[in-house]
Amino acid sequence: DQQVKQNSPSLSVQEGRISILNCDYTNSMFDYFLWYKKYPAEGPTFLISISSIKDKNEDGRFTVFLNKSAKHLSLHIVPSQPGDSAVYFCAARKDAGNMLTFGGGTRLMVKP
Amino acid sequence: DTEVTQTPKHLVMGMTNKKSLKCEQHMGHRAMYWYKQKAKKPPELMFVYSYEKLSINESVPSRFSPECPNSSLLNLHLHALQPEDSALYLCASSPLQAGLGQFFGPGTRLTVL
């Protein structure tokens, strides 16, 4: 049973435009949601997080939106840059033990 | 120092070998993690250490044995592995406060022959 899902395995965007990566979850006990970026042959890099009591968090070009009623979150990257090309993982945290459950990832390709 | 380092980067071992993966961080994080990642799949949690004590073991076979000698080091001892254990093994660390994210190392690419 996949508790965190990223339904789009890949996304292609033109440089300078907005990239929107989506994530759905099923467990209402998750209290934090996080986005990670992963380049080949490297470990995931933490990008941005949002608490379940918020609906938006912004950090530079990255904004995460949370819709609790729909159990849906999204990561907006604007403007997109070729260096943003990577696999993006959505992750959700349950309180005890700081355990993360990851989605399957979305490969973002930003074309110059 | 905001890095998590892992050694070795690559490891090839036979099914009868004993080897160890090492992970180190100097960020003062008191939680450390081992994940396993197969190709085109998300990382899967194996173990969590909090304050150098094993707090979570996600039903991992006993051929994987974690060890946390101190607050900066995390080892994963491997013995009698199977070819299906071939994967990228990721170490991560984090503060215990929520929402601050886990910092991942680059991983050890393990191949079991």
Image: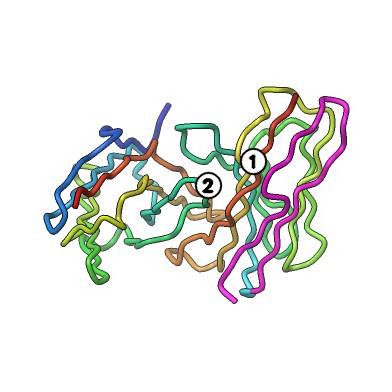
Asked if residue A8 lies in the magenta stretch, the reply is no
Asked if residue B17 lies in the magenta stretch, the reply is yes
Q: Is residue A111 left or right of residue B70?
A: left
Quadrant containing the N terminus of chain B is bottom right
Please state which of residues B95 and B84 is positioned toward the viewer in this rendering: B84
Chain to which the residue tagged by mark 1 belongs = B
Query: What main secondary structure does the magenta stretch of the protein show?
Result: strand
Say if mark 2 contacts mark 1, CB within 8 Å. no
Span highlighted in magenta in the image: B1-26
Name the secondary structure under disc 1. strand
| Residue A108 sits in quarter | top left
Asked if marks 2 and 1 fall on the same chain, the answer is no
For badge 2, the amino acid type reads Ala
Chain to which the residue tagged by mark 2 belongs = A
Separation of residues labelled 2 and 1 (CA atoms): 9 Å
Please state which of residues A52 and B9 is positioned toward the viewer in this rendering: B9
Badge 2: few (under 14), some or many (20 or more) residues near its Cα, within 10 Å?
A: few
| Residue A77 sits in quarter | bottom left
Q: Say how the picture is coloured.
A: rainbow
Q: Residue at x 80, y 52 (%)?
A: B67
- What is the x, y in percent for residue A9? 30, 33
Q: Is residue A24 left or right of residue B43?
A: left
Quadrant containing the C terminus of chain B is top right
Which label belongs to residue B109?
A: 1
For badge 1, the amino acid type reads Arg
Badge 1: few (under 14), some or many (20 or more) residues near its Cα, within 10 Å?
A: many
Please state which of residues A21 and A83 is positioned toward the viewer in this rendering: A83
- What is the x, y in percent for residue A50? 32, 61
Disc 2: which residue: A41
